[in-house]
Image (cartoon, rainbow, N blue to C red):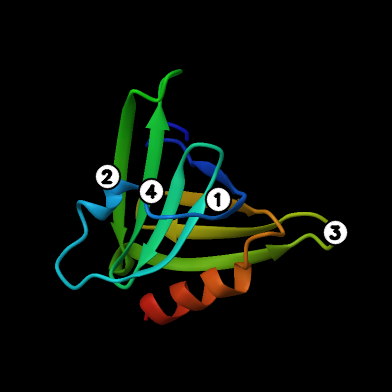
Amino acid sequence: MADQNENPVWTLTGKTNVPASVEAILADGERVLGAYKTIRDALVLTDRRLVLYDVEGLMGASETIRTIPYRAIESFSIQNKGIGKEGLEILTRSQTISLKVDRSCDIDEMAKILAKSCV
């Protein structure tokens, strides 16, 4: 993932289990609605927030977990490029998070989660 001051671009390749480090910080009663993977990282959507799990370093010895409450998301957009990957952009108060979504991911499912949560 990119530096926090840059606009990160994540390429999601499929669904995944919630990383143990993310599971450990979920609040009592917080429900996971979807979890998606990159090669080493994960994007987790709960009923309260979006969680970016970033594994860093060559050996994966360091990890960063960043949470974005849905109230901080101003808007999101879906890009359809026809053949190939689709994209999803999430605009927060401080940055834009760009997601490239592989065909094995259900972009409509992600959009529905965001639409329900960002009202």
Q: Which residue is mark 3?
A: 83
First of labels 2, 3 by sequence position: 2
Q: Are marks 3 and 4 in contact (CB under 8 Å)?
A: no
Q: Please tell me in which quadrant of the rendered image residue 88 appears.
A: bottom right
Residue drawn 41% across the image and 20% down it: 57
Q: CA distance from mark 2 to mark 1?
A: 23 Å
- Residue 11 location in percent, x, y? 60, 46
Quick one: label 2, few (<14), some, or many (20+) residues within 10 Å? few
Q: Is residue 67 above or below residue 9?
A: below
Kindly identify the residue that appears in the image at 51 percent across and 78 percent down: 112
Of callouts 2 and 1, the N-terminal one = 2
Closer to the N terminus: mark 4 or mark 1?
4
Of marks 4 and 2, the one in the foreground: 2
Q: CA distance from mark 3 to mark 1?
A: 18 Å
The answer to the question of whether label 4 and label 1 lie on touching residues, with beta carbons closer than 8 A, is: no
| Type of amino acid at the residue the image marks with label 2 | Ser
46 over 40 or under it: above or below: below
Q: Quadrant of the C terminus?
A: bottom left
| Residue of label 2 | 21
> Considering depth in this image, is 3 or 106 the residue closer to the camera?
106
Q: Which numbered disc covers residue 52?
A: 4
Q: As shown in the figure, which amino acid type bears the numbered disc 3?
A: Ile
Type of residue at label 4?
Leu
